[in-house]
Image (spheres, helix red, strand yellow):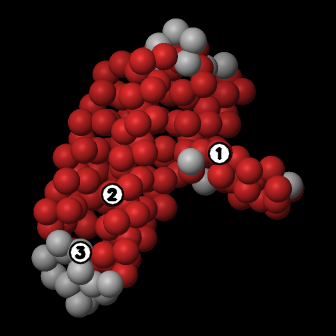
């Protein structure tokens, strides 16, 4: 197993643990736990997808264009659900079916990435790309870019969020 597969697979496992916490917290609204677990999940999930889009998918655009396109489309759908759920959590109207839908979608998406995408990308990622990818997963790259060059950081955020 490559370092890319190992590191991204670990990120998936941690995101799924956060999703399980969220699923439990939605059953006990009003104690504030839901907003906290939602904030942790949202930040982590968006950072994970941004890192994939910046460093992983460009490696595979030429060799696996259909898979890359499908991954972008799934990320767009995941972001829609995250936006909707974020509003619902804020308004205290979040319900279990919406969280279950996000969990099911993420399970399928991650399984596909674990099986194929990460293996292909692991073969192609240079040491420099791996270093940038791992920093982005930890959230340190964006912080470094923000302090060094705010315009560069915000343009990379806009690109990856669109
Ligand atoms: Fe993804
Ligand atoms: Fe992923």
Q: Is mark 3 within 8 Å of ligand 1?
A: no
SS assignment at label 3 = loop
Q: Is residue 107 above or below residue 6?
A: below
Q: Residue at x 32, y 36 (%)?
A: 110
Which labelled disc corresponds to residue 159? 1
Mark 3 crowdedness (10 Å alpha carbons): few <14, some 14-19, many ≥20: some
Q: Residue at x 55, y 28 (%)?
A: 56
SS assignment at label 1 = helix
C-alpha distance separating marks 2 and 3: 12 Å
Which labelled disc corresponds to residue 94? 3
Q: Is residue 29 above or below residue 153?
A: below
Using residue 94 as the reference point, say whether residue 114 is left or right of it.
Answer: right
Mark 2 crowdedness (10 Å alpha carbons): few <14, some 14-19, many ≥20: some
Q: Nearer the viewer, residue 135 or 63?
A: 63
Which labelled disc corresponds to residue 81? 2
SS assignment at label 2 = helix
- Whichever of callouts 2 and 3 sits on the residue coming sooner in the sequence is 2
Estimate the x, y position of residue 105 in percent, counting from the top left.
25, 44
Q: Nearer the viewer, residue 118 or 85?
A: 85
């Amino acid at each position: 197993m490559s370092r890319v597969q190992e590191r991204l697979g670990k990120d998936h496992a941690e995101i799924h643990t956060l999703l399980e916490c969220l699923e439990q917290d939605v059953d006990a609204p009003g104690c504030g736990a839901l907003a906290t677990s939602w904030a942790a999940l949202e930040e982590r999930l968006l950072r994970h997808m941004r890192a994939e889009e910046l460093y992983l998918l460009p490696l595979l655009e030429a060799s696996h264009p259909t898979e890359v396109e499908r991954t972008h489309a799934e990320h767009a759908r995941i972001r829609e659900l995250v936006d909707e759920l974020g509003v619902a959590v804020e308004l205290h109207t979040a319900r279990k079916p919406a969280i279950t839908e996000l969990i099911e979608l993420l399970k399928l998406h991650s399984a596909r990435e674990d099986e194929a995408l990460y293996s292909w990308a692991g073969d192609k990622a240079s040491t420099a790309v791996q270093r940038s990818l791992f920093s982005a997963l930890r959230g340190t790259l964006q912080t470094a870019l923000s302090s060094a060059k705010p315009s560069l950081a915000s343009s990379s955020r806009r690109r990856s969020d669109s």
